[in-house]
Image (spheres, grey):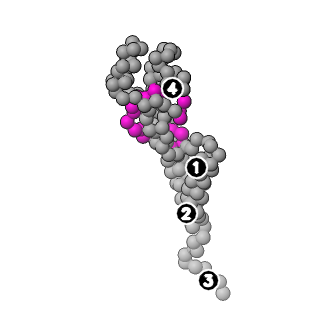
Amino acid sequence: MKTSLIAFVLALIFNSYFFASKIGIPAPFGTQEKIIKVRELPDNFEFRIRDGSNYDIGSLYMVKRFFWLGYSYGEPKYVGYLNSQKKYAPFTSEELKQIAERAKIQIPKAPEISFFDRYISRLLLLCILGLSGFYGHKFYIRRKKIIAEKEQEELPSWPPSTSH
């Protein structure tokens, strides 16, 4: 019974991942690129791309997710943030310095990872896993006690009674 329950839960998780990706729901597992805005640039012609949309300075990094909570991150790098999680403009370090000089802004030396991804999501994931382990252990102890009580009821008494 225990093996079939584990197999059912694993099948449900993998099936939900497949189904979610088919209908376009962001999957709760896997790796995803994430872009956050680091510095806002003035909305003028100097800070536009070819299609006419303005960009800001953003940080792009890879997030490994479990139930929408990140637990591992790739090395962040600066990109042009285009108000979208799907599109960005890549920058070299020289282009980034020129943009900072023209916009008269200070850019941090190292690209950032969002506060939620770096700290809060790991803390929430740790709490969820801790509570799951705690209540799983309580369930296991309770189940073990019930099975032991059933076994005690089924044992024959000794010495066996002889009735003639």
In the image, 38 versus 71, the foreground residue is: 38
| Mark 2 or mark 3, earlier in chain | 2
Q: Residue at x 40, y 28 (%)?
A: 91
| Magenta residue span | 66-86
Residue 131: % across, % down: 52, 42
Per the rendering, the mark at residue 3 is 2
**Is the residue 16 above or below the residue 5 in the image?**
above
| Mark 2 or mark 4, earlier in chain | 2
Residue 144: % across, % down: 54, 59
Nearer to us of marks 2 and 4 is 4
Nearer to us of marks 3 and 4 is 4
Q: What residue is pinned by disc 1? A: 17
- The answer to whether 101 appears left or right of 69 in the picture is left
Q: CA distance from mark 2 to mark 1?
A: 21 Å
Q: CA distance from mark 3 to mark 1?
A: 62 Å
| Mark 4 or mark 1, earlier in chain | 1
Inspect the image, locate mark 2, and give the three-letter code of the amino acid beneath it.
Thr
Per the rendering, the mark at residue 90 is none
Inspect the image, locate mark 4, and give the three-letter code of the amino acid beneath it.
Arg
Q: What residue is pinned by disc 3? A: 162
Q: What residue is pinned by disc 4? A: 50
Nearer to us of marks 4 and 1 is 4
